[in-house]
């Protein structure tokens, strides 16, 4: 019988329980999403998101684009994010090319400190490129 998946789920549930349980995971998810959405909302349009209704925004993946989709600034953002901060995974290439929006993925393995560093980078990138 295949038990690998059951074992992996057990490890995940044990970790969630050791970290404070489901309510703590929800609190962290909300805090992380708020950090990034605040950057977007306070950027005066430098960063844009297709989800303006705050009641339906994802806490897991935060979509955004830079300066209305400016490709040169987007490339600069991606390079600086990686080279200066080791941030990766904002843009995924599919068989159809790149999507209009990048995304900040805030899965459980991404902690609040890492998310705060991303928010700080996004603010400084905006300040340097306005």
Image (cartoon, helix red, strand yellow):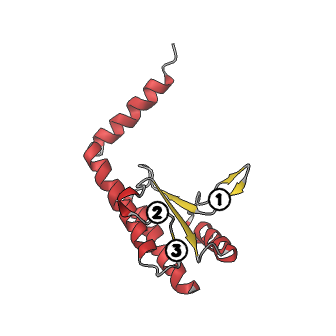
In depth, the one of 10 and 77 nearer the eye is 77
Q: Is residue 21 above or below residue 100?
A: above
In percent of width and height, residue 4 lies at 50, 24
Q: Secondary structure at mark 1?
A: loop
| Disc 3 packing (10 Å; few <14; some 14–19; many ≥20) | many
First along the sequence among labels 1 and 3: 3
First along the sequence among labels 2 and 1: 2
In percent of width and height, residue 53 lies at 40, 63
Residue bearing the label numbered 3: 47
Residue bearing the label numbered 2: 51
Asked where in the image residue 100 lies, by quadrant, the reply is: bottom right
Residue drawn 55% across the image and 85% down it: 128
Mark 3 in CB contact with mark 2 (< 8 angstroms): no
Residue bearing the label numbered 1: 99
Asked where in the image residue 34 lies, by quadrant, the reply is: bottom left
In percent of width and height, residue 51 lies at 46, 63
In depth, the one of 56 and 23 nearer the eye is 56
Residue drawn 64% across the image and 55% down it: 92
Looking at the rendered image, the disc whose residue lies closer to the viewer, 2 or 1, is 2
Q: Secondary structure at mark 3?
A: strand
- Give the total of numbered labels: 3
Between the residue at mark 1 and the residue at mark 3, the CA separation in whole angstroms equals: 16 Å
């Amino acid at each position: 019988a295949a038990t690998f998946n059951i074992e992996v789920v057990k490890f995940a549930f044990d970790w969630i329980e050791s970290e404070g349980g489901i309510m703590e995971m929800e609190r962290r998810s909300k805090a992380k999403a708020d950090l990034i959405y605040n950057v977007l909302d306070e950027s005066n349009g430098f960063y844009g998101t297709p989800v303006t209704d705050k009641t339906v925004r994802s806490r897991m993946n935060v979509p955004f684009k830079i300066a209305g989709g400016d490709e040169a600034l987007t490339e600069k953002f991606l390079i600086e994010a990686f080279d200066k901060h080791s941030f990766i995974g904002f843009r995924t290439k599919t068989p159809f090319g790149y999507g209009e929006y990048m995304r900040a993925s805030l899965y459980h393995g991404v902690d609040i400190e890492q998310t705060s560093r991303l928010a700080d980078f996004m603010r400084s990138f905006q300040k340097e490129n306005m």
